[in-house]
Image (cartoon, rainbow, N blue to C red):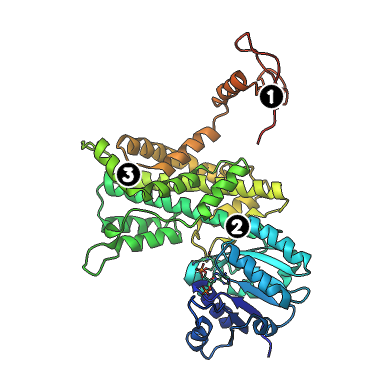
Amino acid sequence: KKTDIGLIGLAVMGENLALNMESRGWNVSVYNRTVPGIEEGVVDRFVAGRAKGKNIQGYTEIADFVASIKAPRKIMMMVRAGSPVDQLMEQLFPHLSTGDILIDGGNSNFEDTERRVKLAESKGFRFVGAGVSGGEEGALNGAAIMPGGTKSAWEEVKPVLQSIAAKAKDGMPCCDWVGPGGSGHFVKMIHNGIEYGDMQLISESYWVLRNLLGLSNEELSKVFSKWNEGRLSSYLIEITANILKHKDKDGEYLIDKILDTAGQKGTGKWSVINAMELGMPLGLIASAVFERSLSSNKEVRVEASKLFHEDKEKSLYNKADMIEDVESALYASKLVSYAQGFAVLQKASDEFNWDLNLASIARMWREGCIIRSVFLNDIAAAFEAEDKPKHLLFAPYFKAEIEQMLFGWKHLVSHALKEEMPIPAFSSALNYFYSLTSSSLPANMIQAQRDYFGAHTFERVDQPRGEFFHENWTGHGGDTKSGTYNV
Ligand code: NDP
């Protein structure tokens, strides 16, 4: 009997997704390459192990694997992002029939997905680039899935993908059609960028309360648990509370023994690079990425700390007030980060004609993924409003929230900086907020300087927008202007 879907790549994500599919009633074919020198017997081990007695058929030959699946075939690839996906597609093509659907569930770069959609379509196949978030646990029990690509594939893959997706409290699956081309992977990339920002903000909160208030790990865990009951309620806050009280085998807190050098696999960096390409500010995520880079250079930090460190008295800050102000700084900065992230999504949507539905994206992130939180309900509601806000911070609900947070946020940022605490994400968010809400900025000076040294021209406040002027600043420059294009 032919199976409903095929899955390639039996590492942690693939194995768990296959089991998830099977548990929802789908018959699954699985395949993993067998290459001498690279771990062999992966398929046999899975079929004889976790897949034993289940409706899962294992294959070690790609032709047999493809032939075992019902047409039009749905084949999900869960392999390492990059060239492995291209290699796999080349191996699959000769065995596929017109209309078959390839789904790439890995963390592929959206530009690769754009290219692969075109390539697969040029051969009469269909291609879906689906961002999957939720790690091992999500893969097994319900992930957030962000599919985009060949639109006609959606009706075919929807029943399977929605069945393995997490469900929000209102029962909606955290998986819906995102848009054409590489849009699904773009949305997943921004999700991961936001994840970098959230993690940095939580780390700064922890660091300020630990070092400026001297809270113990147990006390800190209680603060995060309490926050998790309110508007900050989210998976990352919840696991932070658990991490803080987790003890090592010797009874001491494990968090204090973990080396402070953060790793990264690139999706945060890609978010920032693409935001730059689109000419959009994404400062909070950028500061989170750069802070990971700085943290990983421990040797230099240790040396610098000896050069510049000075012991001094800490100035006073009421304990309850500081906890409240850190909560304000965390919430307001998170709001800024999401506002920046969604603005990048909107810009990409306009630029690439994706017609993204921002409310639907916020809804997809409510469960299953790493950034899941109650806050995403409010974001979805803001974008669903009849009078759709130009910017998330303009939504009446969030405007009121920021107004309420602002005093504590700025008080905390200025205090922490005076106390020489690094809070790059809190302060980046506050600076963004100040710039965003300034009707005048010193960019007139930048324009004057550009015109002075390079005849780049400027617009004038007393002339209509779109008219460009050049000044002969020194009296000996010419009248020849540079072009007025922006990149
Ligand atoms: P890995 O990213 O480590 O990928 C391992 C799998 O890729 C193995 O099945 C491996 O086969 C296969 N593979 C590698 N190179 C090739 C190749 N040239 N041809 C065919 N197959 C190849 O495993 P994960 O399960 O962690 O991730 C799978 C995908 O899902 C990745 O794109 C990842 O970024 C993404 N992802 C991962 C998450 C996580 O939490 N781990 C969360 C969300 C997405 P072999 O066993 O033979 O080496």
Q: Is residue 418 left or right of residue 450?
A: left
Q: Is residue 126 visible?
A: yes
- Determine the secondary structure under disc 2: loop
Question: For residue 109, which numbered disc appears in the image?
Answer: 2
Q: What's under tag 2, amino acid-wise? A: Asn
Are there few (<14), some (14-19), or many (20+) residues within 10 Å of tag 3? few
The first of marks 1 and 3 along the sequence is 3
Quadrant (top left, top right, bottom left, bottom right) of the C terminus: top right
- Answer yes or no: do the residues labelled 1 and 3 have beta carbons within 8 Å? no
Q: What's under tag 1, amino acid-wise? A: Ser
- Determine the secondary structure under disc 1: loop
Q: Position of residue 375 (x, y in %)?
A: 51, 55
Tell us which disc is closer to us: 2 or 3.
Answer: 3
Q: CA distance from mark 2 to mark 3?
A: 32 Å
The first of marks 2 and 3 along the sequence is 2
Quadrant (top left, top right, bottom left, bottom right) of the N terminus: bottom right
Q: What's under tag 3, amino acid-wise? A: Val
- Determine the secondary structure under disc 3: helix
- Residue appearing at x 41%, y 37% in the figure: 410
- Residue appearing at x 41%, y 44% in the figure: 329
Q: CA distance from mark 1 to mark 2?
A: 36 Å
Question: For residue 258, which numbered disc appears in the image?
Answer: none
- Residue appearing at x 34%, y 62% in the figure: 243
The first of marks 1 and 2 along the sequence is 2
Q: In this figure, which residue is indicated by the disc labeled 1?
A: 482
Instruction: Please identify the residue farthest to the top as the structure is shown.
Output: 475
Q: Position of residue 157 (x, y in %)?
A: 68, 72
Q: In this figure, which residue is indicated by the disc labeled 3?
A: 300
Q: Is residue 18 above or below residue 392?
A: below
Q: CA distance from mark 1 to mark 3?
A: 43 Å
